[in-house]
Image (spheres, grey):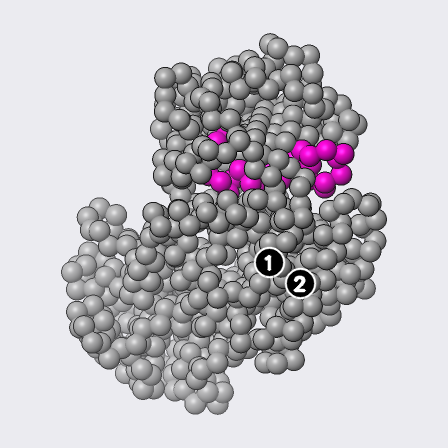
Amino acid sequence: MKKIWFYQRLQKMNFYSHKWCEDGNIKFRFLHDHLIEVGRNSYKSIKCIYLNKNDEYLKKSAFIVGCLHDFGKYTEFFQDYLLYNKKQKYKSHAFISALYAAYCAKQNNFPDEYVLYIYLAVKHHHGNLCNLDSDIGIPQLQQNISYDIEVLKKQCDNIKKNIHEIEKDFKCVADFSFKETGIKLDYIDSFISHHEDIFNYLVKIYKNIKYTSNSYINIEFTDFLLIYSALIDNDKRNAASLDVNDRKYNIKEELIENYKKSRFTTKYKINNMRDELYKTVKHNMQNADLSNHFYTITSPTGSGKTLAGIAAALILRDKLKDSVKKLYRIIYALPFTTIVDQNYEVMRSVLSGLKDFEENDERYIIKHHHLSLSTQKIAGEELPVDQSLMLTEDWDSEIIFTTFVQLFESLAGFKNRNLKKYFRIANSIIILDEIQSISIENWENIKFLLKLYAEKFDIYFIIMTATQPNIIDDAVELSGDYKSMFRQLSRVEMHINLEPMTPEEVIDKYINCKYSSILFMFNTIKASIDAYNHLKTLTKKKVYYISTNIIPKHRMDVINKIKDSIKNKEDIIVVSTQIFEAGIDISFDIVIRDIAPIDCLIQSSGRVNRNGNNNKKGEIYIVNCSPKNSCNGYFSRHVYGQLHTDISLGLLKNRVTIDESDYLDIIKEYYKCVRQLTLQSSENLERALNNLNFFKKNKSEINDEYYVSNFHIINDFDKYINIFVEIDDEAADIINKYKVKKYNYYDDDIIKFRKEMYNYIISVRKTDLKNIVCDKFYDDFYIIRKNYLESSYDNTTGLKINNGESLVI
């Protein structure tokens, strides 16, 4: 055990907040220093946000939670734990700190809603948000609060015992507070004697909110989340000795112009359209009225929306800097990690033209999703992995590439890790690319969040898609006459064949078409594997199989082989699921696609003749793949639902072909039908946020109340489990390390190979687990050991499910 090198010099009544190891020595941070620094920085975090309202109480609340969030560490129980590792129940500090912070807010005549925000933010600064019933509520008092009250009394007695030493140490915090903000914090003695009063006052606030129809308390959940976010981010940063990054002003649209000139020299027909789109978007944004917070870029697949959208955001950023004197971040959100990675690499290439980019790359740009691993540099010096990960999760950069899940489950979130970045989303320009991929049932929730944050946080949104779903009615179109763009295009022709066919019959019908590269896209793994196995018996061409049923490591190998084969003009056939629908920049001569919602079919057609450089049109054939004696669109119904499938079948049944120039008309017709039948209200999410109902702590309690935790971008995510496939020695090494260190999320070794670990993971439905030979590793994480591979995993088609009936996509 390491010796605490200067422990002999520690005075009995010095108080510390954290300890850490540096160069083999244990070091400590003074508690009063930590409180002052977190208070100052939390205040600054809110102060730098342009909110277009009186935010004095908001800033001062952030200051109070920062200065008092660790007040409970003044007990001997915590100090003994920190110095001697004495673990006991009285060392906890969040509840007493929350009550003291609320007490000080009340003594300083803060409005009741801010007294509540302050209590909740401090109470949960080490965990996820909960709900008022669990945090205060009378019905749950005995179950959820009684333990905290018992601990509180012991802690108050201990503080009273050492009151003079504590007040002496805390004086610098109180003096700093009064000097900087006029807020008095020196109420320790009074609080110890009347700590029950403040809890009773919180109960009074709770009752007024819960049971009074015309409550005088004006709850704004965005204010509470800003306070909470500023606290948890600055607390973690200070504990890790991390400063806030300086902002980077020198990112101009001209960087994209230079990138385009150096990269796009090939004379594809589509390049003329790309140039025209870019110029139009640029011109329209330069002349945009800043009172408009919503913009759209509607253009066909492959027409250059990515660079045009980023250019628009950079132009808008400069306009806002001149207008409101604030530097807005750019957040680029996409549905899939693969597209996030692709677009991130493009933007890195754009930014490489900056002189100091290599030394400060992630001060300019980061990517953040569950597989991203960043190594941040400041002034050329590489930061430790744990600090890099923390900065990445904080979104402390100028341009952030991320997923819809990361973005929207922060805007309406309850998890501590997701909400660290919440205050940095304010004053941003958010690009939403391929927004149609969000389930239509969620559109009203998305619309509510976009409208709310445009108003509350002065956020600007640029919505980009080839199949504009029109979620925001009053958006300004930046691409000009986009309808004419669609009419000009004729790269692809869609052929409709709704005669029911089995997967094997689909292969038989189209295997002999005279094209060099053929892609078969099925809706389920079961159908795709049946088709692949049948195809292998019929052809000597190169045949590739790819789906989420194979581990990501094998998946990338297959994608690279497909790219090489197409580049070398080899004859190939690929069998896949919807993995090729978006996000993989590969163009085939012909695609055969099982029936799906119209927007998915149009996305799939983007895999055909993508650059429009073939002498004749590419072709996509839409087929009705179903088992014998089953309903039309059988596999589509299982993946997308009956309603979406039936609407698509209805729109296509009387058509033989659809030219790409007519895509816009049919997608509008599809969205019109779907919206009439599937649109759901956002009332549940609005009510949960406004009532601060974030998460149901007591899962055994039966009620129909909706919580923020019920909101998900990916539906049924909780119905899946992860299986790690120990396919080779590298996999065995990774899983053995993870077994030892999995409990420390920020451990350097875990962070370094966490991404490698995901290269061997497959997600499957929990209901399929009983048909897979594997071992439970922990919780909902399973492993296929090497000795199970023969019965559980095939190197080509992936996971073997013994009954063969899985419909996982």
Instruction: Please give left or right for residue 620 compared with residue 129 in the image.
Output: right
Where residue 129 appears, x then y in whole percent?
Answer: 36, 59
Q: Main secondary structure of the magenta part?
A: loop
Residue 165: % across, % down:
40, 79
Residue 15, position in %: x, y?
45, 71
Range of magenta residues: 594-618
Task: Answer whether residue 607 is visible to the viewer in this image.
Answer: no
Tag 1 near tag 2, CB within 8 Å: yes
Question: In front: 374, or 703?
Answer: 703
Instruction: Work out whether mark 1 precedes mark 2 in sequence or the reverse, and give the earlier one.
Output: 2
Q: Secondary structure at mark 2?
A: helix
Crowding at label 2, few (<14), some or many (≥20) Cα neighbours within 10 Å?
many
The residue that label 1 is drawn on is: 297
Marker disc for residue 281:
2
User: Image height check: is 614 above or below 73?
Assistant: above
Q: Is residue 603 magenta?
A: yes
User: Is residue 566 something one can see in this rendering?
Assistant: yes
Between 537 and 60, the one nearer to me in the picture: 537
Say whether residue 108 is left or right of residue 282.
Answer: left
Image point (52%, 70%), residue name: 293
Query: Residue type at mark 2?
Result: Val
Residue 538, picture quadrant:
top right
Find the residue positioned furthest to the top. 537
Circle 1: residue type = Ile
Q: Position of residue 412 (x, y in %)?
A: 41, 59
Residue 465 colored in magenta in the image: no
Whether 467 is drawn above or below 365: the answer is above
Report the Cα–Cα distance between label 1 and label 2. Answer: 8 Å
